[in-house]
């Protein structure tokens, strides 16, 4: 298997000139990597802030005045239903409160 | 200052062997120089992380060099695929100075090795040209020693068959 003469392929080593060229590019490479890392951090922080803002807004919508309004509407409807049931008015009690319940369930 | 001296010492000790490895991997001296710079930058950054005194730099450096070379070849492949440049296959783009020291047989070996998959190529080169032990190669490539041996056999078998094919 080893009868292939791999050592026939030799590479000329780095000359002093090559070495100094490699060294010269190092500072630039380091600077670019640092700049890229700073950009990534800023971008990550921006995305995190956007996500946090979105979450805050979402939780505000869920627990804020809109839901309280709906809860109030629901309570009023239930009270009305009970009042009408008590006075024996059967005209509008069958469907109306159920519709309110249905709407609330969808919105919530 | 002490840390800087150690970085310089590491760079001086390993630059030439890493360069040889990279030139053979990518087939181009200018690209290999650029990749060597990237490896040295990573070495400096790793050094700043205050690694242990017994940190195994050699396998680590070869791992970084291999990843850089594979990443470069992958980008080249994409560039060729989308037609950004008119490069031929890696085997054909090797510049003359790479095989300046040898004749036709060197070029044939070079072309045969360039046809290997990156995994087989790195295993073969780490063993044949860089002189790493099976254990060291296993460490570089995060694989078992048994896998190193089988990859090496497969790489040598393929190179031999391609050389015979091209010979006649």
Image: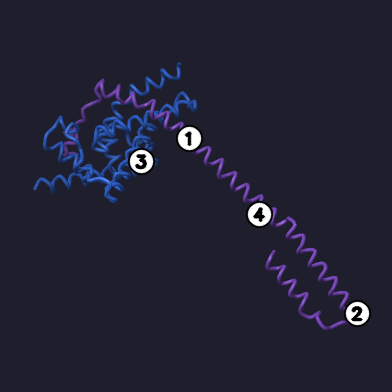
Task: Relative to A30, say whether A100 is above or below.
Answer: below
Q: Find residue B159 and report its image quarter.
A: top left
Q: Chain of mark 2?
A: A
Q: Is residue A66 found left or right of B52 in the rendered image?
A: right
Q: Which chain is purple?
A: A
Report which residue position mark 1 lands on.
A37
Q: Earlier in the sequence, mark 1 or mark 2?
A: 1
Residue closest to the eye, B126 or B30: B30
Report which residue position mark 2 lands on.
A87
Which colour is chain B painted? blue
Residue appearing at x 71%, y 68% in the figure: A105
Residue closest to the eye, B86 or B52: B86
Residue appearing at x 66%, y 52% in the figure: A57
Mark nearest the camera among 3 and 4 is 4
Residue appearing at x 29%, y 28% in the figure: B17
Task: Relative to B124, say whether B19 is above or below.
Answer: above
Find the distance from the CA under tag 3 to the CA under tag 2.
89 Å
Marks 3/2 same chain: no
Tell me whether the residue at label 4 lies in contact with that at label 2, contact meaning CB atoms closer than 8 angstroms. Answer: no
Find the distance from the CA under tag 4 to the CA under tag 2.
42 Å
Q: Chain of mark 1?
A: A
Report which residue position mark 4 lands on.
A58
Which SS class for mark 3? helix
Which SS class for mark 2? helix
Q: Dot 3: within a 10 Å radius of its alpha carbon, few (fewer than 14), some, or many (20 or more) residues? A: some
Report which residue position mark 3 lands on.
B145
Mark nearest the camera among 1 and 4 is 4
Mark nearest the camera among 1 and 3 is 1
Find the distance from the CA under tag 1 to the CA under tag 4.
31 Å
x and y, in percent, of residue B119 in the image: 31, 44
């Amino acid at each position: 298997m080893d009868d292939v003469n791999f050592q026939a392929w030799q590479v000329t080593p780095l000359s002093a000139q090559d070495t100094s060229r490699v060294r010269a590019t190092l500072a630039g490479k380091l600077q670019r990597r640092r700049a890229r890392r700073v950009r990534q951090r800023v971008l990550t922080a921006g995305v995190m802030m956007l996500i946090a803002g979105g979450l805050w807004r979402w939780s505000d919508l869920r627990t804020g005045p809109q839901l309280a309004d709906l809860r109030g509407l629901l309570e009023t409807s239930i009270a009305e239903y009970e009042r009408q049931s008590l006075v024996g008015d059967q005209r509008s009690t069958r469907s109306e409160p159920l519709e309110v319940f249905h709407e609330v369930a969808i919105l919530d | 200052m002490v840390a800087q001296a150690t970085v310089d010492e590491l760079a001086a000790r390993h630059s030439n062997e890493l360069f040889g490895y990279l030139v053979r991997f990518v087939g181009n001296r200018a690209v290999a120089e650029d990749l060597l710079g990237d490896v040295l930058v990573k070495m400096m950054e790793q050094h700043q992380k205050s690694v242990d005194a017994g940190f195994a730099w050699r396998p680590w450096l070869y791992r970084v060099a291999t990843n850089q070379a594979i990443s470069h070849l992958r980008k080249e492949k994409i560039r060729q695929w989308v037609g950004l440049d008119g490069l031929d296959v890696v085997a054909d783009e090797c510049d003359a100075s790479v095989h300046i020291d040898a004749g036709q047989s060197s070029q044939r070996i070079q072309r045969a090795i360039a046809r290997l998959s990156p995994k087989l190529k790195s295993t073969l080169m780490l063993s044949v040209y860089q002189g790493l032990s099976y254990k060291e190669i296993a460490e570089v490539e995060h694989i078992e020693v048994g896998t190193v041996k089988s990859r090496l056999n497969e790489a040598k078998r393929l190179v031999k068959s391609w050389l015979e094919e091209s010979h006649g």
